[in-house]
Image (spheres, rainbow, N blue to C red):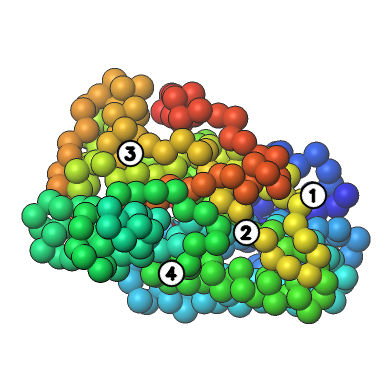
Amino acid sequence: MRVLLTGSSGFIGSHVAEALECEVVPADLRTGVDVRDGAALDRLLPGVDAVIHQAAKVGLGVDVADLPDYASVNAYGTATLLAAMARHGVGRLVLASSMVVYGEGAYDCPRHGRVRPGPRRLEDLAEGLFDPRCPLCGSVLSPSVIAEDAPLDPRNAYATTKLTQEHLAANWARETGGTAVALRYHNVYGPRMPRNTPYAGVASIFLSALLSGRPPQVFEDGGQRRDFVHVRDVARANVLALGAGTAGALTAYNIASGTPHTVGDLAAALAAHIGGPDPVTTGAYRLGDVRHIVASPARAVADLGFTAGISFEDGMKEFALR
Ligand code: UD1
């Protein structure tokens, strides 16, 4: 099998390249290929059996000045790639998507069961009440796990363009009979994670602080829950996804460890491995942040045969010490 891998020099893409045991055709800005360049794709796609599409503008963006770039790289880039795949009869796509397509996580109200909270209230955040409230009765909600059929609610440019990629891929699959698999990554961490950029995730921010002798700044009360999944597990999920899916449709999978941890746990684990300083819980909050988002990994287990193999303890130790 021959696989075109976009974003092959990036954080996740470089691990996917290492995990693939077949011929890999790399397509990356660093190899001189922009996914928005249909003519460049035309030169690479002949003889390719499947595309793994990791190239993207990532992170949450800085401000609205970033909007054209997100739309161009993520939406237009994917559209260009799909059109080129159709020209060359490439019938299989694995797409890097994200848990950010869900917006908030899943929550249960003691009176109303499963509900979808709106954005958290400023007054609540200012008083240190960080858990969202029931939109019907105002009760504080308890977090649950989110499955792939949950309503989608992208809340920023990155999330919107990741969901657009899924929609474009579904459209391509319907029109061409191709098979599309979207992998909704949870919080990916591990070797080569981008550092010191506005787009860095929390694990990398905490590690950078510790390595320069500063305490990690834990926002809110540190109780916000995430699923930290190791990049080598994510790479393996991509390889498994090459054999999954349904012709003519897009199927989405949560790619997560299945074992949630709090941001406070994360700071404590990294600080312990580096030997301090101890994390500081600041009570500060970012308005756009999701409180808890924890995945159900059940569909990926059932269909892809994917179970994360690297525990939080082992993965964080390696991440801190290498
Ligand atoms: C992150 C990514 C998002 C990606 C998703 C899934 C970023 C900025 N966000 O979303 O693009 O799709 O994972 O892989 O890369 N926090 C602190 N202290 C800090 C920084 C953050 O306590 O110094 C807290 C935040 O308040 C939040 C949590 O850590 O509660 C996670 O933050 P972050 O990693 O930035 O974003 P996610 O929402 O998890």
Measured Cα–Cα span from mark 3 to mark 4 = 23 Å
Q: Secondary structure at mark 1?
A: loop
Measured Cα–Cα span from mark 3 to mark 2 = 25 Å
Q: Residues within 10 Å of mark 2 (few under 14, many from 20)?
A: many
| Residue in the picture at 47% in, 79% down | 68
- State the residue position of label 3: 262
Tell whether 87 sits left or right of 312: right
Residue 110 in percent (x, y) is at 27, 53
- State the residue position of label 1: 243
**Sooner in the amino-acid sequence: mark 3 or mark 2:** 2
Q: Callout 4, which amino acid?
A: Asp
Q: Is mark 3 within 8 Å of ligand 1?
A: no
**Sooner in the amino-acid sequence: mark 1 or mark 2:** 1
**Sooner in the amino-acid sequence: mark 3 or mark 1:** 1
Figure check: 169 above or below 189: below
Figure check: 164 above or below 4: below
- In the picture as drawn, the residue positioned furthest to the right comes out as 47
- State the residue position of label 2: 252
**Sooner in the amino-acid sequence: mark 2 or mark 4:** 4
The residue lying toward the viewer, choosing from 32 and 116, is 116
Snapshot quadrant of residue 228? top left
Q: Secondary structure at mark 3?
A: strand
Tell whether 265 sits left or right of 55: left
Residue 209 in percent (x, y) is at 28, 38
- State the residue position of label 4: 153
